[in-house]
Amino acid sequence: MIAVVPFEKLGAFRNEWLNARHHFSFGEYHDPGRMGWGALRVWNDDQIAPGTGFPLHGHRDMEIVTYVREGAITHRDNLGNEGVTAAGDVQVMSAGTGILHSEVNAGAEPCLLFQIWILPQRLGVKPRWETRQFPRGDRRGKLVPLASGRAQDRDAMTIHADAAILGARLGEGESAVHSLAPGRRAYVVPTRPGLSINGIDVPARAGAAITGESTLTLLAAQPLEIVVADVP
């Protein structure tokens, strides 16, 4: 089954510096029918204005993956970590026993990103943060694991969850195939229009919640990027 929720139907929040859409219940947006998808708890589509961002705040016991689509985000935390994650790259934060952090767009243009939260397998792990460059050329025409807790994804950044976040860049007419093991589910978001999954159209920045499908064929009618969560 492939259930598509259009971008316009997502939860929305906007203030003077943040324009956000929530694929699942988050903050002031609450939908009892959309509390997550398996171990996937949050998928926020954020646009952050230049010179602004999320001030210092805390998290516990959550694996947080940030996929930057445009611009860059600067991370600082109480562990002494500081770094910039630019468009096409990914950062991972394991909140574990607790971490305080800020995320700021220090650039001159808006920063667009996906913020993805995954429930961990174990509580109380040591908190950590990591960012890594993922050359977009390496994701051309194929799905590449970006952050994962699966043993087979050795080149991905580590998360403390039986889950994987994968990304691909597809040109016009290109496709990628993803296999779902029994009992697994997927959540797929394209950055632009033109994606179909097993013949089902998925509009730009919409969410496709998938279960009961062993093979996913992701076909692009025009150039786009896709991000996939593979979760129990």
Image (cartoon, helix red, strand yellow):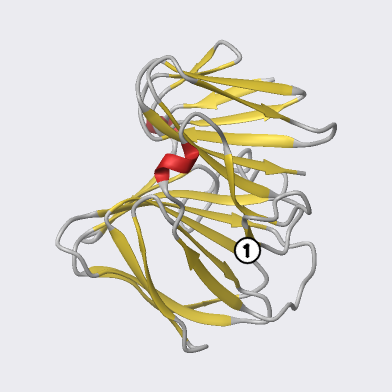
- Across and down, in percent, residue 134 comes to 46, 52
Point 72% across, 35% down: residue: 185
Q: Is residue 11 visible?
A: no
Q: Is residue 7 left or right of residue 143?
A: left
**Total number of numbered discs in the rendering:** 1
Amino acid beneath label 1: Glu
Q: Is residue 5 left or right of residue 203?
A: right
User: Against 211, is 150 above or below?
Assistant: below
User: Against 200, is 12 above or below?
Assistant: below
Location of residue 211 (image quadrant): top right
- Across and down, in percent, residue 223 comes to 35, 25
Query: The residue tagged with tag 1: helix, strand or loop?
Result: strand
Point 77% across, 44% down: residue: 232
Q: Is residue 101 left or right of residue 72?
A: right
* Residue to which mark 1 is pinned: 63
Q: Is residue 54 visible?
A: yes
Location of residue 92 (image quadrant): bottom right
Quadrant occupied by the N terminus: top right
